[in-house]
Image: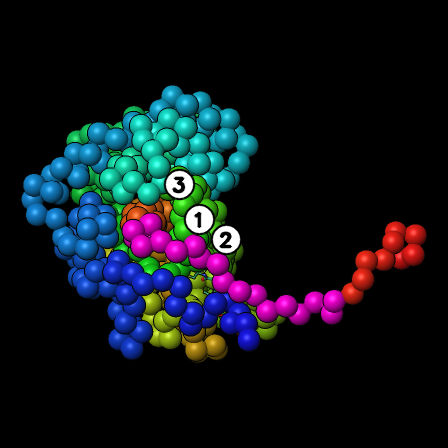
Amino acid sequence: MSQKGLEGVVAAQTSISDIDVENSRLLYAGYDVTDLVHHATFEEVFYLLHHRELPASPQLEQLTSQLTVERDLHEFTRQLMVTLASTTSPMSMLRTLVSSASAYDADGWVVSTDHAANYRKAIRLVARLPQMIAGHERLRGGKWPVEPNRKLGHAANLLYVLMGEVPSDEDARVMDQCLVMHADHTMNASTFAARVTAGTLSDIHSAMTSAIATLKGPLHGGANEQVFEMILKIGSVEAVPEDIKGRLARKEKIMGFGHRVYKREDPRATILRELARDLGTRKGDMKWFEISEKIFEVVNSEKGLFPNVDFYAAAVYHYLGIPKRLFTPIFAASRIAGWTAHVIEQLQNNRLIRPDSEYIGPAPRNYVKLGDR
Ligand code: ACO
């Protein structure tokens, strides 16, 4: 019997993250993500996902310095960006740039099972993704990419290279919190794709390319962009009930709702709702938060569905000034912390991932010559 969508199938053992379904809790190596969002930085979480322990000061200083030093993009990437920005979507560009980054990585030709080299590659990729993502937006807008700012932490630099100005401490902290909460999520589709690729002993850049390609789809990470498109189209709190009921009557899925694992509210959605409310208040513009809240109210009462991580993320990113087409790439900029940790974990105890299929085609039959068909 096939298990459609592999629901309930355990594809790997992991010590990186876990979901406590009963209590709607997400844990990174035993730490509650809600706790981490309130207290930790993305740099600490990257370390935690890779080492399963929070870093002490010297370890954090070393990692922060590595993540800062490795921000500069290679000339090869810069040239590719100019062509790709004018011809592809941000996610397609990111997928191609990450794939091509293996060409000049200092450990590019090292065997795929060298964990120390994979960790160095992970740091380089994490450090460079913000510049790759921001480059698309700036080049599309006729502006030259901004050089990374070494005085800023990872989250603040991301906003800096995107906007071209140093963000407020409050906005940088919200960005950091978003990066923390998106960094890993057990065997989600893109992480599974990364582990499948790594399981063939392919290299980490190939695994990241698979992961980005998988995250791109609207049933996974691509949902956050679709959520904001829906919010924009609806346009007002008053228009929400009719619009949402119409979508449900047409059997359309409401993006940002439902989850394979959570049966109640995704804990990350709970945090993001508060962030959206705070940002709306701080920026003096509650419209996007209020439309989101009304959508939640109607979807929940009509279908009993709860929001997932992508729902309130849309309003939060918009309040931070991030353009809609970059919502999914920003997700990738965080999730790459988890993907790379999973690839290394897979390779430390590898077995080829190769499920079965249930054949439902025609019974065995003989070849029929072309003229007899
Ligand atoms: N809107 C309307 N109905 C929904 C939604 C939704 N967002 N989500 C699930 N349902 C309904 C389905 O139509 C189905 O109903 P049926 O049994 O009457 O046919 C039932 O709930 C089960 O849905 P499935 O799609 O089978 O659930 P699955 O576990 O395969 O999918 C998924 C989970 C993909 C997240 C789904 O809820 C969905 O498509 N949501 C919208 C897209 C989205 O927000 N994706 C982001 C997820 S979080 C992330 O990946 C980062």
Q: Residues within 10 Å of mark 2 (few under 14, many from 20)?
A: some
Which residues are drawn in magenta?
A: 345-364
Is 25 on the left or on the right of 3, as rendered? left
Residue at 31 percent across and 55 percent down: it is: 349
Q: Name the residue that disc number 2 marks.
A: 217
Q: Callout 1, which amino acid?
A: Thr
Which of labels 2 and 1 is toward the front? 1
Among the two numbered marks 2 and 1 on one chain, the one whose residue lies closer to the N terminus: 1
Kindly give the residue lying farthest to the right in the view shown: 371
Residue drawn 50% across the image and 53% down it: 217
Taking the magenta stretch, the answer to whether it contains residue 312 is no
x and y percentages locating residue 263 in the rendered image? 38, 75
- Under mark 2, the amino acid is Gly
Between 188 and 165, the residue placed more toward the observer is 188
User: Magenta span has 362?
Assistant: yes
Report which quarter residue 248 is drawn in: bottom right
- Looking at the image, is mark 2 or mark 3 earlier in the sequence? 3
Residue beneath label 3, please?
Answer: 203
The type of colouring in the image is: rainbow
Q: Does residue 283 appear in the picture of this structure?
A: no
Placement of the N terminus among the 4 image quadrants: bottom right
Check disc 1 and report the residue beneath it: 200
Q: Nearer the viewer, mark 1 or mark 3?
A: 1
Q: CA distance from mark 2 to mark 1?
A: 23 Å
| Secondary structure type for disc 2 | loop
